[in-house]
Amino acid sequence: MLILALRFETPGYLVLLAVLPLLMLVAMRSMSGLGLVRRTLAIILRVLVVTVMVLSLAGMQHTRKIDDLTVVYLFDRSRSIPEDLQREAFRFITRSADHRPLNDRIGVIAFNGTADVEQLPMSALALDQVPAPYHPDQTDIASAARLGLALLPSDSAGRVVLISDGNENSGSVLDEAEQYAAAGVPLDVLPVEYEHRDEVVFEDLKAPATATTSETINLQMVLRSQRQISGKILLYHNDTLVDLNGGADGAGYPVELQPGPNRREIPIPLRAAGPHRFQARFVPDDTAADTIVENNEGRAFTVVSGQGKVLILTSAQDATSDPSSAQILRRALETEKFVCVVDVAGATPIDHVRLLDYSVVILNNVAAGDLRDEEKQTLATYVRDLGGGLIMLGGEDSFGAGGWLGSPVEEVMPVAFDIKHKKQFIKGALVLCMHACEIERGNYIGERCAIEAVKTLSARDLVGILAWQWLGDQQGHWVVPLQPVGNRAHIVSAIKKMSMGDLPDLDEVMRPGVDALAARRDVGPKHMIVISDFDPQEPRPDLIRKMKAHGITCSTIAIGYGGHFINEKMANDIAEATGGRFYRTHDVSKLPQIFIKESREIRRELVQEGVFQPQVADPLSPLVVGIAGEAVPQLRGYVLATPRELATVPIVHPSEDADDPILAHWQAGLGKTVAFTSGMWPRWGPDWTSWPKFTKFWAQVVRWSSRQSAESAFDLTTTTRGGKAVVRIDAVDKNADAINFMEVAGRLVRPGDDATPLRLTQTGPGRYEAEFDARDRGNYILSLRYAMGRGAEASSGTLQTGLSIAYSPEYAQLAANVPLLSEISARTDGRLLGADQADRVFDRAGLPPVETRRPLWESLLHWMLVLFLLDVAVRRIALNPLKMLRNRLAEMAGRGRPQAETAAVLTTLRGTRDRLREQQRPAQGEPSTEAAPPPKRSVPTPTSPERSTRELDGAGPDRPVSGKPSSHKPPQSESDYLSRLRRAKRRARREMDEDDEGKQ
Amino acid sequence: MTCRGSSVCFVLVAIATMIAGGCSGADDQSAARVELIFGCTGLGPGEFSYPRAAEVDGAGRVYVVDKSARIQRFSPDGKFQLDWAMPASTAGKPTGFGIGADGRVFVADTHYSRVLVYSPDGELLHTYGTRGSAPGQFLLPTDVAVFADGKIYVGEYGGNDRISRFNSDWEFEISFGDADGPEQARLRRPQSLLAGPDGTLWVADACNHRVCQFSADGELLCTFGQSGSEAGELRFPYGLAWLRDGTLIVAEYGSNRVQRFSTAGKSLGTWGTAGREAGHLAYPWDVAVGTSGQIYIVDSGNNRVQVLGPAGQSHW
């Protein structure tokens, strides 16, 4: 239903229309020289021009009242709502969509901690399910409400329907309700109601943030139960079950919980330095008596300061060999009283809580692919933000040869893993072939693979990327033609722009790559990687023969497992025939590791083998104190790397090109890192293991890089409440006096390795506090530095602490927050819907009428331009159709006369002309200055061409044509001149009036 | 007022642009010949997510399958009528289908190694096929052709590129085009099958960039086409259909065009260029001809079907 109307944005300008009568009056006088018709037309046009201009200035708008409605659903997909209720809620959406009037639209937003648009407003519900966004552990109704309001189109009425339990733990939806009220959009609410009546919630597990060795701490537990229930508490200390029931069977601590909060305390003796992790779980005797099991757990940890340990991570191959390089190093360090732990990289997950136990981590020839991406990021954060030490030892799988290029670990090391300082260096070439695979997010996976491949290559290596993609009329499939990696940015940019399609034949994308690799004679290793679901046609046999002939290896990576047919035989045959490897990738998240492994094929030139004499280049380095004066033993191999500008490089391998670093170290953020590019002692350093100073050297290296920590007299506590955590330091000196004006700051590492700075502010005598968000499940690690006193009394130190969130706050909710939902609908004039009211969603009850406004000033400007041009034309161009017709007829009549008659007329005319000229000529020496009156129209006068032209121009005769001689008179005054002009004007007007009368 | 002031300039520029645009030349000739375009990107009724095959039944209704694993049925003038989804699609989506004389729809459910038989209204009537390379089994079936005598031909690829023939009771009879046959008859991804009026089988041999004609018993009768983009050459022929004048129309997936051939293999013209506008094509997978002679081109990369009038063929 449409209702048309006009409105004005600034109606005050309409006052200007009052000048129109005045304008008409002035125009009538000023345009008196025009004929009546032209004058009238010109005045009308001018009035229209001014009217349109005024309407444009007043902001004239075309308004349209519309009856269409857009409904946007905000669908709560957080964990607090049981799955069956979420399914029921979606059925409400589908039922309501069935009642949608023809022109109404429907949009869907799913939300939990984040809000995603699942369907833009459209004329049908196109979803058969609504996926949950990525943060189900939170509920942020406010952000969903904000998005919902933004999604409503302006050309229809809008209604937003919130389907939720109302248990928000991020943002405030009531703040957004004000925006709805201001916009006049009702926020209807369908409460998803539930109430868990048989529930035990492990509300809190508290442990002191810090403790000293040999101290016994009290673990405090708070469990809230809704009814009397019996069960037991299982406690794990550093993942080991603690026997809490004395001599009885089992290890559980029996408890009888009463309705309401129940507090328990368990003393735990601490024996060793490092982090102590505690995990307590309540297990009811009757499992049916507790609905949600996720909220039965509490976590905490205590950091005991003291001498940190050394973690040596090594490869699985080294761990099982004898002698093992890692064990050689471990024995050497243990003779210097270090406590060492040797572990296989990847065998035990690395996280920040685990690393708190260690002051140094040594990577002994560990390949980057042996650790997950998150673990590499954790190692970098451990150094930069938590002050840990990191030592990387060389080997075939280390540094750039181990695929560490471009990793977060490289960023904190004192050497870059790329080779920039060598003039003579054999580069490798990698070509990547891919296409769209028939799997979910296939294009995204391909893009990630290509970027990972580029990241692992040296800037001087060659890379090319081929993909079956839309190129229009262009030929070829190069996304990135084979070229030096150089600055990776433009290559990554090209990769992100590619849009892959269905590939019919692998030969199509592989052949150009093989041709390009075969043509390059200046590269060493030539490698190709094909990532595919291997449903395209296999490459032709001649292509495989060409690859073998040119030494091009090819690895194949099959993706798309899970029902999809994959021609594994084809993939395996290609890899086998060319000396590559075939990977079955069931988990696409492992693809980056595969690419890191594959990059070793290209990077093998980084490993330099052969006996050489390392030299001490910087004897002042603290790492070579005591050994600088003598020759260090020979080594038999190392990995090429480039020293960073600010790094100290105490030991090098001199070469003609540029010295290669063997030992380098520097400070990286709060921590220290050391690169020793040789290693693999039995193979590359047998002379080093027999060197008497081997033990002393490595003790110096480890001691220098160790994280510094000391026992603190400060009382450090962490507490959590309502998604917030508070870290508090109570600082007193040895006289129990409060320590004021300390500087306390550091880094907070959240779950997911997101490190942010944190500064504690003084809130009381000797008390320093900081608050931060702690909603995500996981561990929060704090590394703080404090400084106090001035001058000689100045002192500083570091503190480590943290806290643990055991479960999502979603699981702490036992009932829907209906009062909040009611408040939301009341504030926005919305409705509280019931589950059986799906048919009411699209009704118009309570909706204000909606208007759409279309500004018309732009159209008015167009019209004004046209009218103005017409106005000018009417005033400046005189078109007299009758006269033109008359002239035309006269011309035609003249053309029909015989020649003799025409000549006679011309002779007569010439005679008349000469006679007139004779009459007009003034007496000699008496120039004529007064115009003679013009002849009357009724008097036939010869028509000269000049006369005709003037008439067509619309101007009357302005000089005498009469033959009456003029008498000589003295020069006239100015008033006489004006009076003559007035007379001439009157004559012209009279003549024109006569002209008009003649027409009528 | 500032907005209005700047918009005056915009209006003048727009006028100048319109004047300039008006002088730029006439519309693309190809666009002029497109009678109808239906479908757009989306998952709703009448919308497509990479359509890959089309067929026309005896009543002139158009069926289209796309990568949402749906078959949609349209009226001859492109009005949506109904749709149905495949029973499963996580492993992959169908790439082709055929329609029998009785109106049944035979869908090559490619990644499930089977053929699904539906009624014209989408009721699942029959399922046939298991994964494997044995006679009567399939790896990746591409298309189905149903002959007037009830014989069913199924093309497949994936390492076992061949065509299998079944009787109307789905009893396996013969297979051909694989490595066991003569080298000249070996197929590389037979993407589309078409029953000839004389009982022969026409095959779009996509990765050999040619069209083959087989006898009903699998004997290779003739081939035409080779890799290239000139007239008479083919780049990944994916779709085949008969025009009413007895000539053959071929959708070229790799050349973004359709090409008309005589049955003797002589190129009679091409239509379409790469692009996104009307009259342009992006990865055309298939082509079908309506009962009135109109040509339905599955413009996969543009998520639409372009329809050429029956008179269109006289131009190319």
Image (cartoon, coloured by chain):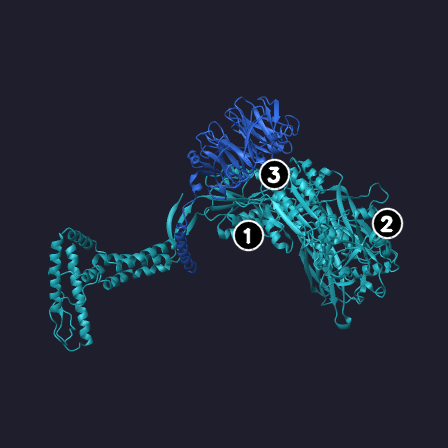
Chain colours: A cyan, B blue
Q: Position of residue A189 (x, y in %)?
A: 55, 44
Give whichever of discs 2 and 3 has the lower sequence position.
2
Q: Are marks 1 and 2 on the same chain?
A: yes
Determine the secondary structure under disc 1: helix
Indicate the amino acid at tag 2.
Answer: Pro
- Badge 2, how many Cα within 10 Å: few under 14, some, many 20+? few
**Above or below — where is A962 with respect to A413?**
below
Report which quarter residue A783 is drawn in: bottom right
Q: Position of residue A98 (x, y in %)?
A: 51, 36
Q: Which residue is mark 1?
A: A176
Give whichever of discs 3 and 1 has the lower sequence position.
1
Indicate the amino acid at tag 3.
Answer: Asp
| Mark drawn on residue A505 | 3
Q: Is A853 displayed left or right of A675 in the figure?
A: left
| Residue ranking furthest to the front | A900
Residue plotted at (17% across, 74% down): A976
**Above or below — where is A694 with respect to B144?**
below
Q: Which residue is mark 2?
A: A323
